[in-house]
Amino acid sequence: MAIFIRNGLIVTGDTAGTTFDPGGVLIEGDRIAWVGPQADAPAGAFADHVEVIPADRAIVMPGLVNAHMHSNESFEQGAYDNLPLELWLLRSYPPFGMPVLTEREHYLRTMVCAMESIRSGVTTVQDDLLDVAVTPVAVDGGAKAYMDAGLRAVVTVAMWDRPFLDCLPYLREIVPADLAAELDALPPVKAAEQVALFQRHHEAWQGHAGRLTIIPAPSGPQRCSEELLRAAVDISARHNLPVHTHVLETKTQAVTGQVFYGKTLVEYLDDVGMLTPRFTMNHAIWLTGHDIELLGARGCSITHNPLSNMKLGSGVCPVRALQAAGVNVALGTDGTATSDTGDIIEAFRAGSLLHKIGSHDPDDWISAAEVFRMVTLGGARSTGLQDQIGSLEAGKKADVILLDRDAWGFIPLHDPIRQLAFSATSECVRTSIIDGRVVMRDRVIESLDEAVLKAEVAETAERFRRDYFPAMQAGADRVEPYVRRVYDRCTGLAVDVGHQPQRRPPLGG
């Protein structure tokens, strides 16, 4: 197949910020063959076999990259509010009452995010697909969903092997003995078995359809043994794969590093060899100056997740300091039960506004153009696909979106990137081309029958809410008083984080 996008306002997203108006993009197979001024279009663009997509009233951009999300939370959208991360985690991933889902249920949960991703201009998603049961069906279901939807996806095999009571400081010493015995009777899957599961998924899915990458993802250093962390480092090095993990999202995690290891979690991860250019730290809020220097010196990436960080009261990522240290910054929505959306335009807007608060010096503020780089080239780097996606350049993968130039948010058109951040909504995304294939045309998804799928998703999601959700909350209720005490104790301790005030998120409500 060959496609010629003709006569559009082309925002290439390259490092020079090149635009062409009017311009064109020629796609041959799964690659961009040419991009440039319309007047210079090559003869091949006008061949009989080439499908022409008129873009006279379109803004043409590289497909967006959602560098961090959790599709497994999709049936819990809107379920929680006014919960800090540690208490939210207990409710969304309780030790008691967590259902074991079928492959089809995992597939349908992922499809919720896949559909919202496509509709908001995402062509590549990095899905940290968490499965407490540690079964093969979670990744199998998620991978099949992304393949059917037509998305490019980087799917994690999430890992953790420490007992529940040993993942938070002070928790073991305050939980009653009888409850502790019940919790300890739920032994985590051993490190060797989790490595074997990764290998199984890697052999089954890596490179599937040219659009799927399988990567290791230790859930967080406080939830993983040193053996498992080092195994993830080895997997990343042997297969040249990214490795993602959640680090320093909350003040509690900052305290955890000092209590568990006598150093910051970043320093500990450096000790085990995790900090390399393949490493992405999700959230990266409660960092010390030395942490930031280490991440920059090691060539690491972080994902900035402003929506969930605000909703959970976690804090504000020190993006400007990280950029100054040379850290690559990508953008994510985070999970659909923390940001409660897979709409990357919402995260784009939040990231473009949030950092204007807290400093009177506009040089400290983060611009829409910088966040656009996070959601394109920054995300490409974090997913290990920097040579393949993130900009419209000859030789790169044909991941292209067309925005409606006549959308209200673009009238009058001053600057397409700023107006996508501040004025337009995801409704302006009209057409999506992924890997050279039209996946959505004029807001109609062509890769599958969305109406039929939506009916099945709605029925399954309602069954989850009715039959599974109450047991999850009852299981969380048994442990919440003790986790709350840990949270209260940790948030009352002084931590070396000079870049932000020590504020405590609200509880209840």
Image (cartoon, rainbow, N blue to C red):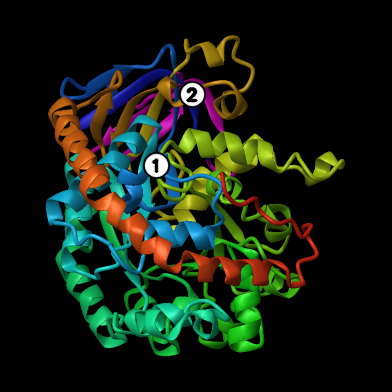
Q: Residue at x 48, y 79 (%)?
A: 175
The dot on residue 503 is none
What is the x, y in percent for residue 298? Answer: 60, 74
Report whether 175 appears left or right of 366.
Answer: left
Count neighbours of disc 2 (C-alpha within 10 A) and say few if under 14, some if 14 to 19, many if 20 or more. some
Residue beneath disc 2: 425
What's under tag 1, amino acid-wise?
Ala
Disc 1 target residue: 394
Q: Residue 449, located in which quarter of the rendered image? A: top left
Q: Is residue 288 above or below residue 228?
A: above
Position of residue 127 relative to residue 311, above or below, is below
Numbered marks: total: 2
Q: From the viewer's side, name the closer residue of 250 and 482.
A: 482
**Range drawn in magenta:** 14-42
Amino acid on which disc 2 is placed:
Thr
**Distance from label 1 to label 2 (Cα)?**
29 Å
Which quadrant, please, contains the C terminus? top right
Q: Is residue 429 left or right of residue 189?
A: right
Residue at 56% x, 65% y: name it.
484
SS for callout 1: loop
Q: Is residue 296 visible?
A: no
